[in-house]
């Protein structure tokens, strides 16, 4: 007898096991293939999410990340290897290169940028879903504002140590992130970070996989199956909790959901610098009024007199004393070798400009 799979279209065969799941089927698979997803962050969670979505056959995956690769990333960022680190590429570019080899039929849109109030509107344009692979609450509150304003579902995920949390935000149906954290994000310095507390890879896979499962429910049109709780995983102590947060939509006067105030989108809450989790590094961004394209080649010529310089079309890396400055074409820089904002700003002003 002829092989049944051999008679199928190659792309249908690629997703056949997924489409045979009765709640997805061929119709659900077609919806997944027609969808556009925005993934913000290509690090630990982003690696798990991007890999799984591309293998599942999402139509277009827009990847946004501000950072570049370091050896310490490989402990938990499964899309990358030592060659990627040695190549000095930004994460979104290295991720896109790998993902294209996994599934060449998925359209990958890699973007090297810091998500902020000035660009998020263009990033969410035309997307069906936003997935959180970021490492800070400022970006998450910005995503939350965009989600509610433009009625785009998003899936939050966060990890620290061996613990993680995840929840789905369906605008107009479920509580949003601001409902959950009515006083806003934690004040910097008041909570543990990856630097101070560490992080174990298995929790990344748990939270990322949870996010992808919920994404497949949404993208395939299975709204009734979407998880509507806050899910807390504490893997070291073997504890898993699902917290009913549905009452928050009516019990708190949420500035985002109830009052339709989008202060993160307005830029009122936006900072211009950030300590990067788990990195001993600080990101410095120019003020919006001063932001302009930087010629990396011209900057390389200027900096060669002061230290060692490596440059490609995506970034410039400058080594001086115990610091490494990684500069991007938008003027943004990551200063490695310190977690002190004042020191990072001094180094940036000294070599890049104020």
Image: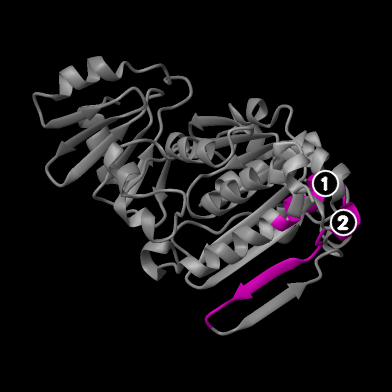
With respect to residue 314, does 141 lie above or below? below
Horizontal arrangement in the rendering, residue 1 relative to residue 68 (left or right): right
Determine the residue located farthest toward the bottom in the rendered image.
237
Q: Pointer 2: residues within 10 angstroms few (<14), some, or many (20+)?
A: some
Of the 4 image quadrants, the one containing the C terminus is top left
Examine the structure image and report whether residue 335 is included in the region drawn in magenta.
Answer: no
Nearer to me, 4 or 302: 4
Residue linked to disc 2: 23
Examine the rendering and report whether any part of residue 260 can be seen: no
**Residue 308: which disc?**
none
Examine the rendering and report whether any part of residue 36 can be seen: yes
Determine the residue located farthest toward the front in the rendered image.
1
Nearer to me, 252 or 299: 299
Nearer to me, 292 or 24: 24
Please tell me which residue is depicted at 68% across the width and 32% down the height of the picture: 124
Horizontal arrangement in the rendering, residue 189 relative to residue 244 (left or right): left
Q: How many marks?
A: 2
Horizontal arrangement in the rendering, residue 223 relative to residue 202 (left or right): right
Please tell me which residue is depicted at 41% across the width and 70% down the height of the picture: 197
Q: Could you tell me residue 325's position as x and y percent?
A: 25, 37
Examine the structure image and report whether residue 218 is included in the region drawn in magenta.
Answer: yes
Q: Could you tell me residue 147's position as x and y percent?
A: 74, 41
Q: Which residues are magenta?
A: 213-236
Residue linked to disc 1: 220
Q: Could you tell me residue 290's position as x and y percent?
A: 42, 20
Element type where label 2 sits in the image? loop
Q: Pointer 1: residues within 10 angstroms few (<14), some, or many (20+)?
A: many
Callout in the foreground (2, 1): 2
Evaluate if marks 2 and 1 touch, with contact meaning CB atoms under 8 Å apart: yes
Please tell me which residue is depicted at 80% across the width and 62% down the height of the picture: 227
Label 2 and label 1: CA atoms lie apart by 9 Å
């Amino acid at each position: 007898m002829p092989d049944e799979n051999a008679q199928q279209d190659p792309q249908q065969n690629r997703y056949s096991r997924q489409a045979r799941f009765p709640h997805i089927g061929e119709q659900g698979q077609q919806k997944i293939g027609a969808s556009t997803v925005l993934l913000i962050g290509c690090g630990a969670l982003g690696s798990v999410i991007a890999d799984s979505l591309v293998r599942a056959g999402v139509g277009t995956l827009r990847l946004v990340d501000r950072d570049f690769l370091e050896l310490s990333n490989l402990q938990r960022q499964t899309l990358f290897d030592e060659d990627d680190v040695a190549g000095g590429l930004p994460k979104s570019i290295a991720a896109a290169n790998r993902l294209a080899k996994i599934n060449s039929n998925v359209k990958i849109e890699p973007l090297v940028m810091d998500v902020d109030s000035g660009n998020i509107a263009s990033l969410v344009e035309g997307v069906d879903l936003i997935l959180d692979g970021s490492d800070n609450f400022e970006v998450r509150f910005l995503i939350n504002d965009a989600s509610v304003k433009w009625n785009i579902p998003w899936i939050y995920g966060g990890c620290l140590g061996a613990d993680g949390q995840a929840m789905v935000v369906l605008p107009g149906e479920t509580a949003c992130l601001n409902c959950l954290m009515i006083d806003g994000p934690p004040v910097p310095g008041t909570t543990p970070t990856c630097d101070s507390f560490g992080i174990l890879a298995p929790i990344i896979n748990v939270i990322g996989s949870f996010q992808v499962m919920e994404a497949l429910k949404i993208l395939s049109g299975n709204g009734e199956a979407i998880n509507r709780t806050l899910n807390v995983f504490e893997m070291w102590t073997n504890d898993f909790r699902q917290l009913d947060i549905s009452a928050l939509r009516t019990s708190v006067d949420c500035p985002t959901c109830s009052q339709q105030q989008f202060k993160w989108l307005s830029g009122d809450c936006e900072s211009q610098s950030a300590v990067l989790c788990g990195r001993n590094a600080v990101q410095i961004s120019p003020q919006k009024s001063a932001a302009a394209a930087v010629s990396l080649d011209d900057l390389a010529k200027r900096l060669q007199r002061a230290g060692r310089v490596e440059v490609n079309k995506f970034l410039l890396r400058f080594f001086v004393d115990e610091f490494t400055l990684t500069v991007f074409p938008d003027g943004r820089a990551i200063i490695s070798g310190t977690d002190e904002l004042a020191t990072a700003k001094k180094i940036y002003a000294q070599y890049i400009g104020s």
